[in-house]
Amino acid sequence: MKSYLLGGAAAVMLMGLATGTAWADAYKDGMAAFRNEDYAAALSLLMPYAKDGDAEAAYLLGEMFGPRSWGQKGENRNGVEQDNAQAIYWWGEAAKAGNSNAQMKLGWWLLKGRDVVKQDEAAGMNWLLMAANQGEPQAQYEVGIGYWKGRGVKPDPIAAYMWLELCSTEPGFENAAEYRDEVAKTMTPEQVNQAKLMVQAFAPKRAN
């Protein structure tokens, strides 16, 4: 009887390993299909992972449902019909799980108020700030402008200077330095020094 029980346990373990390998392989296949712009296959393969709480899979579902200019090359959707409501839903799920790209997408849509999304600048800035704290230059830029212009938050030149300075050395964000200098003109020397200290102390806080 003992030998039988051990054999049964081993069989169950092997089945579990096989299932786990198949699960992982399907995930890799889904990622590969997305990179190859075979969105119909990617959608089918990645949907179970997104429903299971995988942040990257959920983000990519949003990319496939969302506008082409937000992630993929060209206009050929390759089997996935654009659905902005679905895009926002899956970006939202990914954002809540800590995906910084999804936080940026969701934040931008809320900040601007487009299509199926009602404008909510405060909520938009909140999501963008989460991504900015993870070290995303685009989010840092948007947050810096937000604090400068008072979009969804009380204007704060110190915070604006900090975020614009952080992204100003990244490729494509050279104009952040110009905006930072414009903000500095409205600040006291003490405020500028405080902002610079905040820049020095900043360390990205990546989601687990």
Image (tube, rainbow, N blue to C red):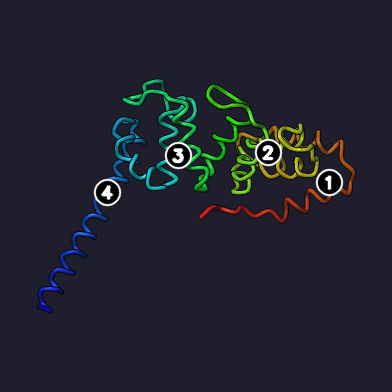
- Residue 95 screen position, x and y as percent: 52, 42
Residue at the image point whose x is 68% and y is 45% from the top = 166
Say whether disc 3 or disc 4 marks the residue closer to the N-terminus. 4
Viewer-nearest residue: 2 or 11? 2
Task: Check the image and name the residue furthest to the front.
Answer: 1
In this figure, which residue is indicated by the disc labeled 2?
A: 143
Give the left or right position of residue 163, taking residue 2 as reference: right
Residue at the image point whose x is 40% and y is 20% from the top = 75
Vertical order, 49 against 87 (above or below): below
Label 2 and label 4: CA atoms lie apart by 38 Å
Vertical order, 121 against 201 (above or below): above
- Specify few, some or many for label 3: CA neighbours under 10 Å numbering under 14, 14-19, or 20 or more: many
Label 3 and label 1: CA atoms lie apart by 37 Å
Viewer-nearest residue: 122 or 74? 122
Q: Are marks 3 and 4 in contact (CB under 8 Å)?
A: no
In this figure, which residue is indicated by the disc labeled 3?
A: 59
In this figure, which residue is indicated by the disc labeled 1?
A: 192
Say whether disc 3 or disc 1 marks the residue closer to the N-terminus. 3
Label 1 and label 4: CA atoms lie apart by 52 Å
Say whether disc 1 or disc 4 marks the residue closer to the N-terminus. 4
Could you say which quadrant of the image residue 28 lies in?
A: top left
- Specify few, some or many for label 1: CA neighbours under 10 Å numbering under 14, 14-19, or 20 or more: some
Q: Could you tell me which secondary element the residue under label 1 belongs to?
A: helix
Type of amino acid at the residue the image marks with label 4:
Asp
In this figure, which residue is indicated by the disc labeled 4?
A: 25
Type of amino acid at the residue the image marks with label 3:
Tyr
Type of amino acid at the residue the image marks with label 2:
Val
Say whether disc 1 or disc 2 marks the residue closer to the N-terminus. 2
Give the left or right position of residue 5, taking residue 140 as reference: left
- Residue 13 screen position, x and y as percent: 21, 65
